[in-house]
Amino acid sequence: MNPPGLVLDTAALLAYAQGRDRVGDRLAAVADRGECVIIPATCLASAYRQVPDDGWDYLDVIAGLQHVVVAALTHRYCAVLGGWARTLGLDTAHAAIEAAAHAIVPLMTSHRDLVTRFLPVGWPIVVVW
């Protein structure tokens, strides 16, 4: 796996499915640097649950990109995830943990105010909207 350059949460995936250029531009920049994009499986599942039917194809595309890694939820993160999910929700907590697990990897989210309660001060947050 190439080094991670970005983590996308559910909000970022939904923005991508709506055709928002900011997400696609970030995906391209990460690929150009030879890095990968991490999509937590909980975020992908949540996006499929929330997106209108015509957005499913976009989620299929993004999850299948060569430089995208869909990160499984493993036992290793469950205790922390359970605690963080009380505030962030399961999907956003998973995204924050994936970002934190990879030495200062930016997190693309619309929940800056919430994730900054858990990530260190100055963590790179890319706001979706």
Image (spheres, grey):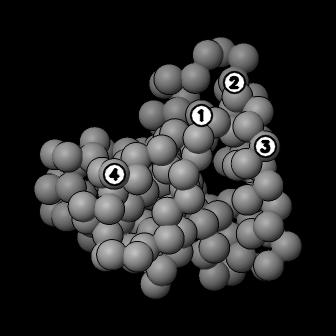
Where is 51 relative to 127, above or below?
A: above
State the SS at label 2: helix
C-alpha gap between disc 1 and disc 3 = 12 Å
Q: Name the residue under label 4.
A: 113
- Spatial distance from mark 2 to mark 1, Cα to Cα? 8 Å
Crowd band around label 4 with a 10 angstrom C-alpha radius: few (<14), some (14–19), many (20+): few
Amino acid at circle 2? Gly
Task: Indicate which disc, 4 or 3, sits on the residue closer to the N terminus.
Answer: 3
Closer to the chain start, of discs 2 and 1, is 1
Separation (CA) of disc 2 from disc 3:
15 Å
Q: Are marks 2 and 1 in contact (CB under 8 Å)?
A: yes
Q: Residues within 10 Å of mark 2 (few under 14, many from 20)?
A: some
Any part of residue 122 in sight: yes
Q: How far apart are marks 4 and 3 (CA)?
A: 23 Å
Q: Look at mark 3 in the image and give the residue it sits on.
A: 21
The mark lying in front, picked from 2 and 4, is 4
Q: What residue is rendered at 52% in x and 75% in y?
A: 105
Residue type beneath disc 4:
Asp
Q: Name the residue under label 1.
A: 14
Apparent side of residue 117 relative to residue 96 in the rendered image (left or right): left
Disc 3: CA contacts within 10 A as few (<14), some (14-19) or many (>=20): few
Label 3: which secondary element:
helix
